[in-house]
Amino acid sequence: MNIKFQRAVDHWAGMPICGMFSLFERVRRLFSGRPATVQPRRILIVLLSEMGSLVLAQPMFADLRRRYPDASLHILMFAKNREVLDLLGVMPPENVITIRDKSLGGFAADSIRALLAMRRIGFDVVIDCELFSRVSSIFSYLSGAKLHVGFQPHTQEGLYRGSFINRPVLYNPYRHLSQQFLTMVAAIESETHPAAKAMAAELSAPPLLQFAAGELEQVESVLLRDFPVLQDRRLVLVYPGGGILPIRAWPAVNYKQLCIELLDEGYAVAVIGLKEDKPLAQEVVAHCNDPSCIDLTGYTRSVRHLLAIFHRASLLVTNDGGPGQFAALTPLQTLVFFGPETPALYSPLAPNIHCLYSGLSCSPCLTAYNHRNSPCDGDNQCLKQIGVAQVLQQARKLLQEAGRA
C-alpha cells in the first residue's frame, strides 16, 4: 500500500473506530475507574513505521530492560522492518509479531492473526510509539492490556485518535524522539498529568554492531572481486533516494555534481539503495561516466551486508532515512540532509553523524500534527539551498579526519 492510501484508510476508517472505542471506554470507566498501576509481566511495544525509528528506540528498549528485568518484551511491527530489529538484538525473535503492509488483503489477514496472538499472550502494558497514528492506537486498545501508553495532543492540534489512552504522554515537538520514547517508559507508573514530569534523560550513542571474526574481510573480498575498480581506492557512498517521502531528498543534480567532484579528487563513488532506487542510481552513474562510479543498488543481501560495506567506506552522504540511522551502528563518517524534518527530533545518536540543515522559516514541514503530509508544493528549498560547495567542504574535512584515523 502506498503512503497516500495508508493515510486515507487511517483517516476514514480510523476516526470512527477510535470514536467508538472512546465511547465504550468512557462508559467502562464509570463503573471501574482508572486502572491501577501494575508491575508489568508482559509488555507490548507497537512500533510499525520506518526502520530508522527502531534505531532511535534503542534507549527505550534498554530502559525497559533496566526497570522491568523480569518482564517479557514483545513488539508489533511491519514485516518489512523485521530484519533491522533482529540486527539490533533487542527482542527475542519469538516475541515479534509482524504485519505485512504491501496490500490491503495481507494487512487485514495479518491484523487478525496479530490480534489473536496479542489476546492469547495477555499483555499488562502496551506502549504505542507511533505519532498520532490511528491504526496503532486501535491495535493498542484491542491488545487487551490494562495500561495503554501513547502520545496524545492534549489541547494542541493533532490527529484525533480517541480518548482511551489511560497513560497519555504529551508529544513534545521540542524534544528528541528518543527522549520521548523514554518518557513513555516512565509513564507506565506515573501518576502525574501529563505523565512523567521529569528532566530529560541523557542520550548516548547506540552500541556498534559486532561482526563475526573474518566477516568484514570476507565482505570486502567479495566486493573487490565484483568491483575490481575499488581496489586501493577510498570509497564514498551516496544515497540519493527519497524512499516513501521523496521531498526529503537533496536534488539529484546536486548528487551528480558532488560525485563528479569526488571522482576528480581520486575517490571511488558507489550509489546505494534498494532495487527500486536503481533508475536514479543508473542516472547518476551515467552522468558521471567514470568507471570508478558504481551502482550498488540492490547489491546488498541484507542490512547487515550493507553495514559491513559501510566499514569498507570512508564516507556516506545520504538523505534523511534508514541509511543515516544505520550508520550510527558503525564508525563510518556520515553526512545526513535534513529539511522537511528536523535533526533536533530525528538526528541519529552517534558522534560520526553530521547533519546538514538550513532551517528555513517553513522547515520542518513534516510533523506529527500533519501525519507527515507536507504542505510544500515539491519545491524543497530547505534542501536545495544546501549547496554542493558546502557539502563538498564538509566531506573533504571528514575524509581527511578518516584518513588520519
Image (cartoon, grey):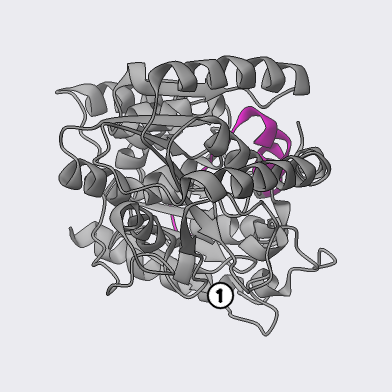
Q: Is residue 261 in the magenta section? A: no
In terms of depth relative to the viewer, which is nearer, 83 or 237? Answer: 83
Residue 297 drawn at (x, y percent): 58, 32
Q: Indicate the quadrant containing the N terminus: top left, top right, bottom left or bottom right.
A: top right
Position of residue 260 in the picture relative to residue 401 (left or right)? right
Residue farthest to the front, as pictured:
31
Give the residue displayed 33% in from the left and 63% down from the top: 191
Q: Quadrant of residue 112?
A: top right
Q: Residue at x 40, y 61 (%)?
A: 180
**Is 279 included in the stretch rendered in magenta?**
yes
Span colored in magenta: 265-287
Q: Amino acid at mark 1?
A: Ala
| 10 Å crowding of disc 1: few (<14), some (14-19), many (20+) | few
- Of residue 194 and residue 296, the one placed in the foreground of this image is 194
372 versus 90 height, above or below: below
According to the picture, the residue beneath numbered tag 1 turns out to be 389
Quarter holding the C terminus? bottom left
Q: Position of residue 393 (x, y in %)?
A: 45, 74
Residue 215 occupies quadrant? top left
Furthest toward the bottom, the residue is: 361
Tell me: 254 left or right of 389. Answer: right
Name the foreground residue: 75 vs 305: 75
Q: Position of residue 205 (x, y in %)?
A: 25, 56
